[in-house]
Image (spheres, rainbow, N blue to C red):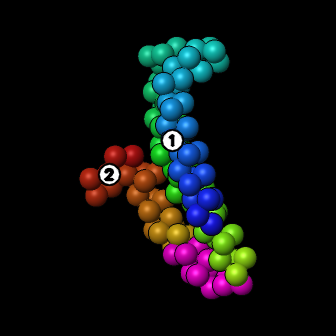
Amino acid sequence: VVQGLWFSLLCGVLAVGLLPLIGPYFRLLGVGVGSPAFVCGAAYLVGLVWGVVPLTASGVLASGFKGVGELRPVLLVNVVCVAVNFALDPLLMWGGFGVPA
C-alpha cells in the first residue's frame, strides 16, 4: 500500500509536469490559444491534473482495504463522496452563493 501511495504521488508530479504542454497540445489539435475553447479546455485539464493524486491514492487505499477483507471503510468513503458530489453538483454547474457558473 505504501509503495502504491508513493506511485500515486509520482503520477501526480508527472501530471503536473505535463501542464506546460497544454498550449502545444491544443495547437496540435488546431485550437487557437486565445479562443474560448482553449480557455475552457485548459481550465478543465488543470483541474483534472490536480485530481490525479487523490484519485490514484483512493484506488490504492480501496484495494488495500479490500485485500485485507475490510470492505466497510471503502463503502463508507464511497457513500460520503457520492453524497458530497450530489450536493455540490448543482452549485458547481449553475453557480450560486458566490460560486461562478
Q: Which residues are magenta?
A: 69-80
Residue ID at (56%, 54%): 6
Q: Is residue 74 left or right of residue 84?
A: right
Q: Which residue is mark 2?
A: 99
Residue 19 sits above or below residue 100 on the image: above
Q: Nearer the viewer, mark 2 or mark 1?
A: 1
Secondary element at image label 1: helix
Residue in the picture at 59% in, 21% down: 25
**Which of these two is toward me, 78 or 5?**
5
Query: Which is nearer the eye, 88 or 72?
Result: 72
Say which amino acid is labelled 2: Val
Front residue of 25 and 68: 68
Q: What is the number of callouts on the image?
A: 2
Residue located beneath label 1 in the image: 13
Please tell me whether residue 100 is drawn above or below residue 72 in the rendered image: above
Q: Separation of disc 2 and disc 1 at Cα?
A: 29 Å
**Residue found at the very far front of the displayed protein:** 3
Q: Is residue 67 magenta?
A: no
Numbered disc 2: secondary structure: loop
Question: Mark 2: few, some, or many residues within 10 Å (few <14, many ≥20)?
Answer: few
Q: Main secondary structure of the magenta part?
A: helix
Q: Position of residue 95 (x, y in %)?
A: 37, 52
Farthest-out residue, left: 98
x then y, percent, for residue 55 = 58, 56
Question: Which percent across, then down, holds residue 18?
Answer: 54, 30
Q: Is residue 75 above or below residue 89?
A: below
